[in-house]
Amino acid sequence: MLGKQDQMIDKQNIRTHVLTEFRDQTQQNFDVLDVKYEKDI
């Protein structure tokens, strides 16, 4: 039982990491677009 819980926690950690990377990359892309099109927030 504990082994399955550990596997689920590992999968959740991987998903969290992937989502964090996606968020960071998306923000970088928007930052580039802001500079390219000279937008101020």
Image (cartoon, rainbow, N blue to C red):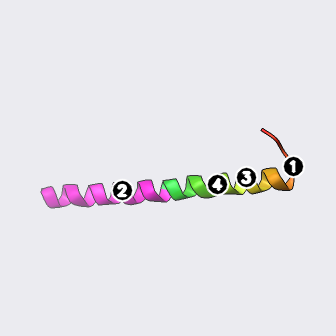
Earlier sequence position, callout 2 versus callout 1: 2
**In 3D space, how far apart are the residues under numbered discs 4 and 3 (Cα atoms)?**
9 Å
Q: Secondary structure at mark 1?
A: loop
Q: Secondary structure at mark 2?
A: helix
Q: Are marks 4 and 3 in contact (CB under 8 Å)?
A: no
Q: For the N terminus, which image quadrant?
A: bottom left
Q: Amino acid at mark 1?
A: Glu
Q: Residue at x 87, y 51 (%)?
A: 37
Q: Are marks 1 and 3 in contact (CB under 8 Å)?
A: no
**In 3D space, how far apart are the residues under numbered discs 1 and 4 (Cα atoms)?**
18 Å
Question: Which sits in the foreground, 23 or 1?
Answer: 23
Residue 23 x %, y %? 57, 52
Q: Quadrant of residue 13?
A: bottom left
**In 3D space, how far apart are the residues under numbered discs 2 and 1 (Cα atoms)?**
37 Å
Q: Are marks 2 and 3 in contact (CB under 8 Å)?
A: no
Answer whether residue 17 is magenta in the image.
Answer: yes
Which residue matches tag 3?
A: 31
Earlier sequence position, callout 1 versus callout 4: 4
Q: Amino acid at mark 4?
A: Thr
Mark 3 closeness class: few <14, some 14–19, many ≥20 residues within 10 Å: few
Earlier sequence position, callout 4 versus callout 3: 4
